[in-house]
Amino acid sequence: MRAPFKFVTASLTAATVLGLALAQGNQPVIGLITKTETNPFFVKMKEGAQKQASALGAKLMTAAGKTDGDNASQVTAIENMVAAGAKTILITPSEPKAIIPAIQKAQAQGVQVIALDSPTDPQSAVNALFATDNFKAGVLIGQYAKAAGFSGNKVAKIAMLDLSPGPLVGIARHNGFLAGFGIKGITAKTATLATAPQVVCAQDTYGDQAKGQTAMENCLQKNPDINLVYTINEPAAFGAYQALKTAGREKDVMIVSVDGGCAGVRGVQSGQIAATSQQYPLKMAALGVVAGVNYAKSGKKASGYTDTGVTLITNKAVQGVSSKDAKFGLANCWGQ
Amino acid sequence: MTNPNPKSLTVPPQRGSLRERLPSLTVLGPLLALILASAFFATQSDRFLTGQNFSLILQQVMVVGVLAIGQTLIILTAGIDLSNGVIMALGSMVMTKFAVEAGVNPYLAVLCGLLTTTFFGLLNGLLITRIKLPPFIVTLGMYNIAFALTQLYSNAQTVTGLPAPLTFFGNTFRVGNTAISYGTVLMLVLYFVTWFVLTHTAPGRHVYAVGNNPEAARLTGIPTQRVLLLVYTIAGLIYGIAALLLVSRTGVGDPNAGQTENLESITAVVLGGTSLFGGRGMLFGTLLGALIVGVFRNGLTLMGVSSVYQILITGILVILAVATDQLSRRKT
């Protein structure tokens, strides 16, 4: 059983590598590894990369983990792409630390590795990072919430629907929101989830609508006076809205979020979400492909951090916080 | 290879000595755990012990609670189903996409969703009984198949703007100050009906017998393969009902739903004292098992504790539950 199986695998691998090597010719090969195949954010990122690669005459290979946090699949993908002759690999690391040895191995073979969307830990493990400034994304909605509803004497009672323990993205958005809201002593360097007297409840949602709903229900049970809700992303925001609606509180509680997917922007349009910070996966991918083609042509690697931008989307603009309306948001959103 | 733990054919005791009539530790365990946890949280938060809060917990566990009915039936036959959550997700996508995007009558759309999940249950059952594949493998494969089909069919996109009939079970009615959702009532009715069939009808008793000792059951004239096929098919239908509850509760068709519910439903069954080795267990224990998880999630939030502790405690309770089952088995 075992020997023929090995033989088949080996020949398949050899044939794939050979086939790819023959097919590529002088075409630069760029690999894109996302966290999952199914998240609309990554679907859009893949689309953007494909479009840019076609425009520049590059060949794009893609791969993804099975679930968020599936490091093993990403490692395998890196190895396969290096074997297939990719000279640049773009990756949204699922595990910021655990992926590093695989990245270093690829780099040792002359491969340029660029992180998209999420940094590695340390960030310097990759050649460059193209991503949203998540702290700034949080700051924007914090500032907005303060100016739109809590600049006077009204006391804020905040529920924070977070991502999950660990990921830097979740910590950056959470802390950014509190800093933007005016809580002292929180900076982009604060390494753990900060808290404040105004925060009456904090729960993990894993960015999932159903879990967001359950978390909000329990938070309302804990403190019925909650009047401001921070959510890690829009699915969690919709879950929170559903819970508030059931409790008859959807009119007098403000929900702010981060992400800017098309469904989320429509939530802003309909008034379910007061404001959201929109990020741009398409741009991350396009910049990544350009950097890959540059490296193939000139041998010059990209470096440092490139902020791909974040825009506050709301239909009720407030003074002192710059924002765009939902129409702009819909024209620039990802997903459906 | 000798079987170290031969099973005897014991249909659950109906009448007998006092010792047999007293509820065993596996029955009392989950109830005790639920009461102790509730008592503890009641001392920690004055918001815990209210009708509204319990209604809330019931609403939060109703989807897993209903999935776990199907899972209990399957585990009673000494099987397991790893595909229930994603089959539910597929059913919910069929319901929502048919109703919203294909313009199908909402009731018909729900029926199509139920038929889809029932079909997948039947498929599981056929592979297990006709080709004699182990349930673990069949449902593991089906997990991947149903998940992939859901993603392909939905293009990984959420469906919103559901018509009212699809969200009916998320609505509530009032009893005093407590708002109770219709979905919760449906879940309790399902538990009652399934319990009645399991304990008061011949096919129900056959489920226990098949799980306890399939060979002995076959020799006594029970059509074991047909019982198994029926169990997996009915479980599929139950997953369809869970799909309807899911879309009612969240108000959307979510292609990424259901990916962890397989393990959550197994957790509820095990916490409820049903033996993973088949043939022993109480359906209402499963409801208690689901409630225990819900109570910890709710109570720890009220206390302001991180939800990671809920996962920790659930893990400890699962091991305790299985250990209790093993120890009580050794005595008999």
Image: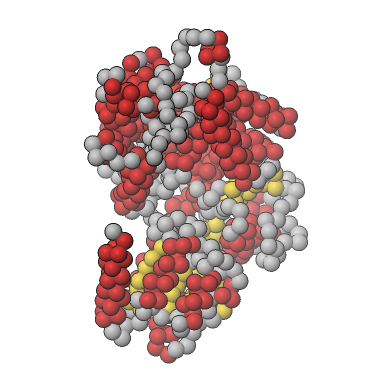
Q: Is residue A47 above or below residue A217?
A: below
In the image, B40 versus A289, the foreground residue is B40
Q: Toward the viewer: B24 or A290?
A: B24
**Measured from the top left, where is residue A195 in percent x and y?**
71, 52
Which residue sits at x=55%, y=10%? B18
Q: Quadrant of residue A80?
A: bottom left
Q: Vertically, is B62 above or below A158?
A: above
Q: Position of residue B62 (x, y in %)?
A: 48, 31
Q: Is residue B256 left or right of residue B214?
A: right
The residue sitting at 38% across, 35% down in the picture is: B79
Position of B76 relative to B161 (above/below): above
**Residue B173 x %, y %:** 50, 23
Q: Residue at x 46, y 15 (%)?
A: B13
Quadrant location of the C terminus of chain A? Answer: bottom left
Q: Quadrant of residue B10?
A: top left
Q: In x, y percent, where is residue A141?
A: 61, 57
